[in-house]
Amino acid sequence: MTTFDLADVRRFTADLDARMDQCDNGEGMECANLDGTLRHYAVLCCEFCDRVRQWGRAIFYGQAAFDPEVERLWIDEGIGLYRRASDLWAHGQELQGECFALQNGAALGSALWRLERLLSAWVTPKPAIAPLARHGVALTQAAKEEVQKRVDALPPLPADWQPTDPRRRPLFRKLQQRRQP
Amino acid sequence: MAHGPPIPLTAVLIGLESNEFQAIAGWPFADPFVKRLLQEDIPQRVQFGNCSIWTYRDPNGSLVGFGTLDMCGECGEYTGGKLHPYIPLLAINPTIKSRGYGTSIVRHLIDEAALLALHGLCHDVLFLEVYTTSEKAIRVYTECGFATVSPEPIPDSQEGGKTYIVMAKRISIAS
C-alpha cells in the first residue's frame, strides 16, 4: 500500500522515467513499433493521472499528510510526461493516413486530454471541510446499526418515475430498456 | 408555506476553468462555510474524485444557482463498500430572490444520481449531510423525498460543535 511520502513518490516517478526511456530506446516488445509506443505512453499517462488522483484523495480524506516537495515532484513529472507524450502523439498524427493506420493514436489523445486537464487546472490538495469527508458518519455502534436500518428501509422511486429534465428522458428510457430482461 | 410547481431551470455542466465557475465562486454567500466548500472542497472533488458541477439558468437566462454531485465512499459502510452518489453542495445565487429554485436543483441532482445508478456506476442511495441550523435546506430536502438516517444530530468539532444530520434517498425505481 502506498504512503505517498517523498520516497514513495520518487520511486513511482523514477519507475515512470525508466519505462519512458526504455520505450524511447526501443527496448522490449511493447515499443517495437510506433503504434505500440503510442499505447505504452497512453498507459503511462493514465497510470500517472490515477496515482495523482489517489494522492489527492488521500490528503482530502485525511489519510496522508501534504508535503509541498511531493507536489513539486508530481507537477514536474507530469509536465515532462506531457511533453514527451504530446510530441509522440503529434508525430503519430503526421504519419497517420499518409503511411499507415495507427490504432492507438486515439487512446493516447484521450490520455493526454486527461493529463492536460489535471495539470492545467492543478489543485493543491488539503484536508476536507465537509464533516462526512473528514470523519465519515462518526457514531456509536448502536447508532450505526440504526443508520443501516433506516437506509435499508428507504423506499424506491415510484415505478412511473422519470427525470424532471426532458432532455434526459431519452437516455433514461434507453438505460431502463437495457436493464429489462 | 405554499409552493407552486418548481420553476423549470436549464442545467449546464461546467468545469473548474469556466467563466461560470469563476462567477459562482464570487457570489456573496451569507454563510462563509458555503464559500469555503465551493472554493476548497469542490475543486478537489472534481480533480481527485468524480464530482460534477452544474449551473442553472432560469427561463430568462439568469444564472440562479449551482449544484454538485459526487460519487464517493463517505457513507460506504452503509452501501457495502460501493461508491454512492453524494451531494456535496448546492446554492442559490444570493443576489436574487429564490422562487423555489432549490427544489428544482435538488430534483435535477436526483435525476442525475438516478441515471448514474441505472448505469450501474454506483449504489442506489443518494446521501448528503446538512447542518441542523440550515432549516430551509432541510425542508427542501425533505420535500424532495430525503429522509434523515442519522439517529441524532452529530456534533462537528471543527465547526465549533455545530451539529449536522445525514439525509438519504433511494434512487432506484420500483419494479
Image: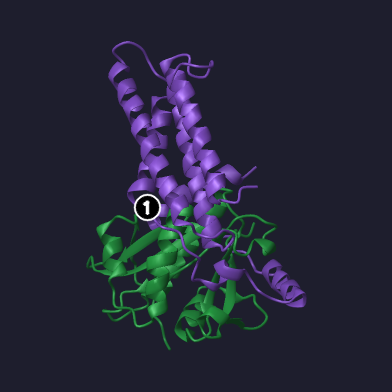
Chain colours: A purple, B green
Which of B133 and A53 lies nearest the eye of the viewer?
A: A53
- Give the vertical position of B147 relative to A56 (above or below): below
Q: Is residue B58 visible?
A: no
- Give the vertical position of B99 relative to B171 (above or below): below
In which image quadrant can residue A8 be found? Answer: top right
Left or right of residue A99: residue B113? right
Which of A14 and B130 lies nearest the eye of the viewer?
A: A14
Q: Give the total of numbered labels.
A: 1
Few, some or many residues within 10 Å of mark 1 (<14, 14–19, 20+): some
User: Where is mark 1, residue-wise?
Assistant: A122
Instruction: Indicate the position of residue B153 as horizontal and vertical percent values.
Output: 61, 83
Quarter of the image where the C terminus of chain A is located: top right
What amino acid type is highlighted by mark number 1? Trp
Residue at the farthest top position: A99
Left or right of residue B156: residue A82? left
Tell me what residue is drawn at x 48 percent, y 18 percent.
A31
- Give the vertical position of B109 relative to A51 (above or below): below
Instruction: Indicate the position of residue B135 as horizontal and vertical percent values.
Output: 48, 86
Left or right of residue B174: residue A144? right
Which of B58 and B91 lies nearest the eye of the viewer?
A: B91
Mark 1, chain letter? A
Tell me what residue is drawn at x 67 percent, y 56 percent.
B81
Which of A9 and B97 lies nearest the eye of the viewer?
A: A9
Q: Is residue B55 visible?
A: yes
Instruction: Indicate the position of residue A108 as horizontal and vertical percent values.
Output: 41, 30
- Give the vertical position of A120 relative to B91 (above or below): above
Q: Secondary structure at mark 1?
A: loop
In which image quadrant can residue B40 be found? Answer: bottom left
Instruction: Indicate the position of residue A135 as horizontal and vertical percent values.
Output: 61, 70
Residue at the farthest bottom position: B1
